[in-house]
Image: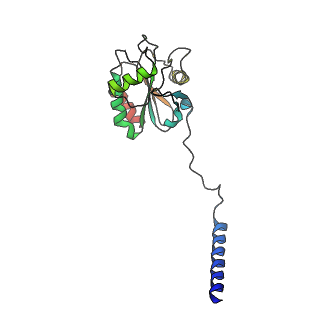
Amino acid sequence: MHIHTFTLRCTGLLLSLLASALSHAAPADATPRATPEACPSILKYTFNRLQDEAPQNLCQYAGKVILVVNTASYCGFTGQYEGLEALYASYKDKGLVVLGFPSNDFGKQEPGSNKEIADFCFNTYAVKFPMFSKSVVSGPNSNPLYQALAKETGRAPQWNFFKYLIDRNGKVVDSFSSLTGPQSKSLVSAINKAL
């Protein structure tokens, strides 16, 4: 009998303490909750991945420093793949991502299929940075990202391996001609500043 009474009193006390704690707690909506990082408008596009054509939303790169490059497999600048991969490998842990957009716009130097381009990039230059399906990057039919980049900077690509640099807030901070290699002081300095 005494044990039963004691158990009831303990249970009552626990319920009382719990009710008191709940009444003093802040309302559920009073504490700000962590929200997914906002996606800047420059990244609100989806492109198919080069290797398997799986749709990829660029918002997954929000909060990173992004180097966007239009590429081609049969260009005098094609060797820049090696430098771009080295740049990506060196800085990815600090927040840099390189995004490659193969295009046949200039000199018809990217005639292959997506699979052929993917095989070439991986087998020849061990490219691991994200690459997307072949698309148009200049003129009125350019893909929507490149239209936005050209509008932001007033500069559209004039040839393969033109580069745009986007900061962590989604602002396009600079653009670089094909002649500016991945290891050039001006590009590396701009990336470090953005990081």
Q: Is residue 186 visible?
A: no
Residue 92: x percent and y percent? 39, 37
**Figure check: 63 above or below 158:** below
Residue at (44, 12) in percent of width and height = 106
Residue at (41, 13) in percent of width and height = 109
**Figure check: 136 above or below 39:** above
Say how the picture is coloured: rainbow
Q: Nearer the viewer, residue 142 or 152?
A: 142
Q: Is residue 4 visible?
A: yes
Residue 182: x percent and y percent? 35, 26
For residue 65, which quarter of the picture?
top left
Q: Nearer the viewer, residue 139 or 56?
A: 56
Residue 96: x percent and y percent? 41, 35
Residue 49: x percent and y percent? 48, 28
For residue 37, which quarter of the picture?
top right
For residue 120, which quarter of the picture?
top left
Q: Nearer the viewer, residue 39 or 186?
A: 39
Residue at (34, 28) in percent of width and height = 126
Left or right: where does residue 56 sit relative to residue 175? Answer: right
Left or right: where does residue 136 sit relative to residue 98? Answer: right
Q: How many labels were placed on the picture? A: 0
Q: Nearer the viewer, residue 188 or 69?
A: 69
- Which of the image's four quarters has the C terminus? top left
**Figure check: 33 above or below 25:** above
- Which of the image's four quarters has the N terminus? bottom right
Residue furthest out toward the top: 107
